[in-house]
Amino acid sequence: MIRPPVYSDMLQNYYEEKFRRLRAERQARLAAVTTPEEARDYVGWARRTVREAFQLPEERTPLHARVTAMEEEDGVLTEAILFEPRPCYLASALLYRPAGEVANGSLPVVLGLCGHSQNGKSSETYRTFARTLAKIGFLVLLVDPAGQGERLQFVRTAGDRFSDCSTHEHNQLGKMLGLFGDNFAYWRAWDAMRALDYLLARPEADASRVGVTGTSGGGTMSTYLWALDDRITMAAPGCYITSFFHNFDNELPVDAEQAIPGLAAAGFEMADFLIARAPEPCLILGRGNDFFDPRGGREAFAQCRNIYDLLGAGDSIRFFVEAGEHGYGPGNRRAMYRFFAALTGLCGEVEELSPGTDLPASPDGQVNWIPGSRTLPEFLAGRCGEPVPEPMGVRDFLRNAGIAAPESAPDYKVLRNGRADSKIISIFGLRSEPGILAFLHWYDGREWNILPEEEKATLIVAARDGEEELLAAPRPGDGSRLFSLDVRGFGKSFPLTSDRDSDFFSPYGTEYFYDATGLMIDSPLFFGRVRDVLAALAFLRAGGYREIRVVGRGVSLLVTAFACCAAPELWDSLVLEGAPASMRELVRKAVYPEPQSYAPRGMLRHFDLAELYAELAVGHSLKLS
């Protein structure tokens, strides 16, 4: 990079302004809730909003549940379970209950949801609390999340390997699902709801006393399920509840299932997951030194408590923080035991059991090695072979996203000229929207403070850094003026925030962080970059360039293509370097390296790249290389 990314905080500041506005509006709404009737109205809004946000299947297919192993230890009976949340999509679980004869309908139940441990339900922490709850007198089901434990989704044979980090597998699944307008949270929530179906179908289960608990990713899913499923009567989510705003403000990337499309844009915050079930009993668990900011946890508790107080149930919402780092610590576990036991009439003062023997549910260690099973990537590959469910023209798709040709050329700022050998680089910062600059570069033997008056332009939309790519590019053979463009987050605005990961392709880095942020507040990074390209094209056209050749490359390739499709009057020829033939083919490969921001969410519900290229070729020269 010739010049340091001096605008590296641009994306952080841009999204912060949007988040702060949403936060202020929500705080004003909450402050206006002062009566029981207004509290009930707010609870109803929270319930509707979260349930509309989750796109869940309508049909509950047969679970085909079976017990594959059984063991008794310390007065607790453990059963290894396989079941199918969706047809042929296997889930592995451990069921715990008091040993000996148990009367039908006599045991209160708890669904245990695992955090991001690579070994899932085999984690000693989860087996410890599940066995202890069973000793107290609960029926407990502990389920492997997809991508963890016995449910690795990219491991089809013993020789396969994807990552030693479960969040990397989750985020890979998330970006593939996003192409279909789907989300990993929807799959995780449905898995948990079907696990509850199995648990409540057990003859020992008392369906009137139903709890859910988990920490970290399990705290996330416990929180979601509490808001989504009225069968649950008590909840104890741990190490998750803070606020969307604090996560963003602290530059904390969240996991694929923790970025719900449009939910924050609707004015919803984490506390609203809990408020959605007010006045039912809930215990918020936290750790004092958690990266999920404890300040947000206290804030969420205060907001919940106000609603619960207005409904006459202030003691039903509780908050317990244990010293220490992120995780389901012993203090949190003891608080959960006492809370659930008090609500169900059991005694929660019992010596905590050891984790006990790990009991695999699948014969060879992975459910996807069982003949007839299907992985989530295979489900998506199957979708790739089906007709497009909602055919739509690319320009209609763009219009629905609020993308159209600019009505006028953007305002701009003139940056000081750069120098490289004998070349003088002129740089304009195009104001494509409030708070955003897209950087347009060109070079010459002299300084330019105005746009040169010429007729032909070649615009390179940079793959990483416009200044470097401008200097490395050969002069156009047609004599046109050569320009390069940094869209937001590239070159001079490359972020040095979040995880400070310089790799666009990192599954959990800075590029992912801002794309996930945009997803949550309905301001997608992809479409923002499309606007940046449109601003540059409008600027060149308004400056007198009658013939404009556009070159899109690398991560900017599809941004460039969609921008040109939105405004065919602003360009004349287009070269797409390294253009894939089909996004469906990329999904069929199961693992592809492109970042989540590479393509717009939901495009494969409406069209594939062939339709995009066909629209681009109408009346224009299009070259795919």
Image: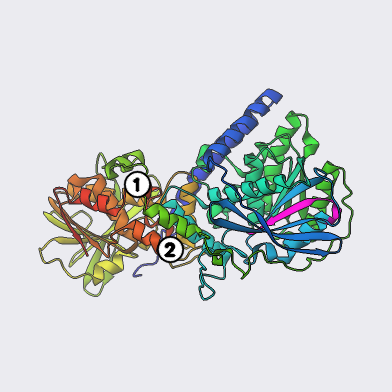
Span colored in magenta: 135-144
Q: Amino acid at mark 1?
A: Val
- Residue holding disc 1: 388
Please tell me whether residue 117 is drawn above or below residue 227 in the rendered image.
below
Which corner quadrant holds the N terminus?
bottom left
Q: Amino acid at mark 2?
A: Ala
- Which type of secondary structure does the marked residue at label 1 adopt? loop
Please tell me whether residue 255 is drawn above or below residue 163 in the rendered image.
above
Q: Let me know if residue 324 appears in the view.
A: no
The x and y percentages for residue 12 are: 48, 53
Could you say which quadrant of the image residue 90 lies in? bottom right
The x and y percentages for residue 10 are: 43, 54
Residue 432 is marked as none
Disc 2 to disc 1: CB gap under 8 Å:
no
Residue at 16% in and 48% down? 618
Could you say which quadrant of the image residue 232 lies in? top right
